[in-house]
């Protein structure tokens, strides 16, 4: 059973199952969505590489640690994985091979899509595989996928002038000095709903442009001198949002280094981490 949330691990586990000739019950969940399939099952069941011979761009892959996941979703997918294992062991029912179950937990919708059969040209399970029992231990999955291991924290970016960045301690000082201080949180809505800095507003980065008029309205209501601080989870997305604000003329806006994770570790230990 595979419940990993990063490409290097998924490729590694699938390759190992191909070599060992063992079926792989694979589940994934992110946000409020989940999916489930069985790889390497039977004579013509595809492996992970059959479907994805080339890894997707790293920027298109989100981990649960970064994008978040609603707790019951991986629980539901895990239960369905256990059911597939029982079916495989007992030989009863129809195994979810060459099919993928897609779950939309938000609206309780389930959909099954057909998958291709095993690829003869697959590097792992094809007729002339390049990933073998001998080559597997030295195969560099991180280099192959261009993604870090699951335990690595995302690389801290430096996209803006250091003079336009402040620490969480400086943010507290600014908020205490000016009650009208505007804190713009660019995390996704579901993360903002979990926890947020008192008085902050949510303008998710994915739809940041749609919130510019709201920000302008708050600034115009209270005067152009109103301080603006932009915060996210770790301090990367907030820099991108800050670049947009600076491009629109809000040059006094600043970024909060380390995001809400720094807020939790340095200001408010009761602030939830997820």
Image (tube, rainbow, N blue to C red):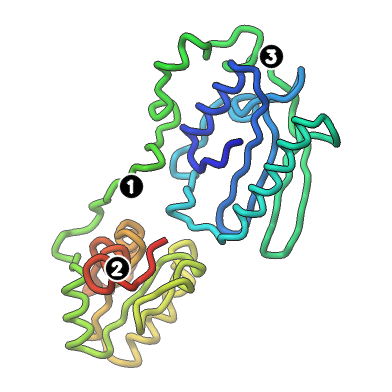
CB within 8 Å, label 2 to label 1? no
Badge nearest the viewer, 1 or 3: 1
Q: Which residue is at 35% across, 74% downward?
A: 184
Q: Which residue is at 73% across, 40% downward?
A: 100
Q: Is residue 89 above or below residue 59?
A: above
Q: Earlier in the sequence, mark 2 or mark 3?
A: 3
Quadrant of the image occupied by residue 97: top right
Quadrant of the image occupied by residue 164: bottom left
Location of mark 2 (residue): 264
Please tell me whether mark 3 sits on a helix, a strand or a loop.
Answer: loop
Location of mark 3 (residue): 120
Q: CA distance from mark 1 to mark 3?
A: 37 Å
Badge nearest the viewer, 2 or 1: 2
Q: Mark 3 Cα within 10 Å, few/some/many (few <14, many 20+)?
A: some
Task: Tell me the quadrant of the picture where the N terminus can be found.
Answer: top right
| Foreground of the two, 113 or 255 | 113
Q: Position of residue 205 (x, y in %)?
A: 43, 63
Q: Is residue 101 above or below residue 174?
A: above
Residue 194 visible somewhere in the drawing: yes
Q: CA distance from mark 2 to mark 1?
A: 16 Å
Q: Which residue is at 40% across, 67% downward?
A: 186
Location of mark 1 (residue): 153
Q: CA distance from mark 2 to mark 3?
A: 51 Å
Residue 98 visible somewhere in the drawing: no
């Amino acid at each position: 059973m595979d419940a990993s949330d990063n490409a290097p691990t998924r490729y590694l586990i699938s390759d190992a199952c191909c070599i060992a000739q063992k079926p792989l019950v694979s589940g994934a969940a992110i946000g409020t969505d989940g999916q489930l399939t069985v790889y390497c099952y039977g004579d013509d069941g595809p492996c992970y590489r059959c479907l994805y011979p080339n890894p997707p761009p790293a920027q298109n892959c989100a981990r649960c640690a970064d994008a978040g996941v609603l707790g019951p979703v991986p629980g539901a997918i895990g239960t369905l994985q256990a059911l597939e294992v029982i079916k495989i062991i007992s030989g009863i029912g129809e195994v979810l091979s060459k099919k993928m179950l897609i779950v939309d937990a938000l609206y309780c919708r389930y959909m099954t899509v057909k998958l291709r059969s095993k690829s003869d040209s697959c590097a792992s399970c094809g007729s002339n595989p390049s990933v073998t029992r001998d080559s597997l231990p030295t195969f560099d999955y991180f280099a192959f996928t261009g993604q870090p291991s699951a335990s690595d924290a995302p690389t801290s970016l430096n996209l803006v002038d250091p003079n336009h960045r402040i620490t969480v301690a400086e943010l507290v000082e600014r908020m205490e000095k000016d009650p009208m201080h505007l804190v713009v949180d660019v995390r996704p809505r579901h993360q903002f709903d979990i926890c947020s800095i008192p008085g902050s507003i949510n303008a998710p980065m994915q739809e940041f442009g749609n919130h510019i008029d709201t920000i302008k309205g708050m600034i115009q209501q209270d005067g152009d001198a109103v301080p603006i601080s932009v915060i996210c989870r770790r301090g990367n997305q907030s820099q991108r949002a800050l670049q947009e604000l600076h491009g629109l003329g809000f040059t006094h806006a600043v970024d909060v280094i380390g995001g809400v994770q720094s807020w939790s570790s340095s200001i408010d230990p009761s602030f939830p981490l997820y």
